[in-house]
């Protein structure tokens, strides 16, 4: 069996992963405590491990459409807060409160979601880790 091409492909894919994803469970990229409320049309809902992603199109202050990516934890973590595989449908307008990236890119961690019918879904992420006393 020739594993060389598979290994090369895996290494190449690893080099393409943004550095923010390398620090997989870190909250360092997020402006924790800051809240941004986004109202926009759902473009896509990716409900899968290890994280779910909601892509929404939001108009900025200039009226231009910006695609935001809102991150959550795995389905097993967000299920109790009401998030399901069929929660979001393309084109529906939702209101999502996120903790945004510190660097200003349109990426955030979902804090709360209000669906078109007014249903409010809770926190879609694990709480931040708290330091333990040593």
Image (cartoon, helix red, strand yellow):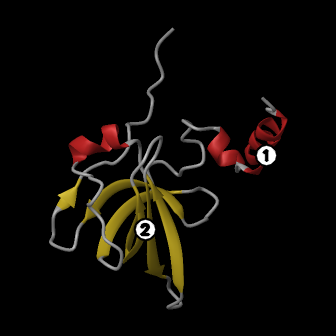
Q: Say which label, 1 or 2, has the lower sequence index.
A: 1
x 75%, y 51%: residue:
16
Q: Quick check: 113 left or right of 47?
A: left
Task: Specify whether residue 35 is in view.
Answer: no
Residue at the spot of label 2: 44
* Label 1 to label 2: alpha-carbon separation: 26 Å
Q: Is residue 81 above or below residue 38?
A: above
| Label 1, residues with CA under 10 Å away: few <14, some 14-19, many ≥20 | few
Q: Where in the figure is residue 65, as x and y percent of width and height?
A: 51, 84
Q: Is residue 113 above or below residue 123?
A: below
Q: Which mark is residue 15?
A: 1
x 30%, y 55%: residue:
85
Query: Furthest residue to the top?
Result: 134
Q: Where in the figure is residue 131, as x and y percent of width and height?
A: 48, 22
Query: Which corner quadrant of the image does residue 35 belong to?
Result: bottom left
Q: Where in the figure is residue 10, as x and y percent of width and height?
A: 74, 40
Q: Are marks 1 and 2 in contact (CB under 8 Å)?
A: no
Q: Nearer the viewer, residue 19 or 46?
A: 46
**SS for dot 1:** helix
Q: Quick check: 125 left or right of 132?
A: left
Query: Which corner quadrant of the image does residue 26 belong to?
Result: top right
């Amino acid at each position: 069996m020739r594993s060389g091409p598979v290994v090369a492909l895996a290494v190449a894919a690893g080099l393409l992963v943004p550095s923010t994803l390398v620090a997989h469970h870190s909250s360092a990229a997020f402006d924790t405590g800051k809240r941004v409320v986004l109202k926009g049309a759902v473009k896509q809902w990716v409900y899968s491990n290890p994280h779910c992603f909601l892509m929404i199109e939001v108009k900025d202050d200039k009226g231009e459409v910006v695609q935001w990516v809102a991150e959550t934890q795995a389905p097993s973590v967000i299920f109790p807060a009401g998030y399901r595989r069929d929660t979001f449908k393309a084109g529906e307008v939702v209101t999502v409160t996120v903790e945004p990236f510190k660097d200003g890119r349109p990426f955030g961690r979902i804090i709360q979601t209000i669906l078109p019918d007014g249903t409010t879904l809770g926190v879609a992420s694990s709480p931040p880790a708290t330091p333990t006393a040593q």
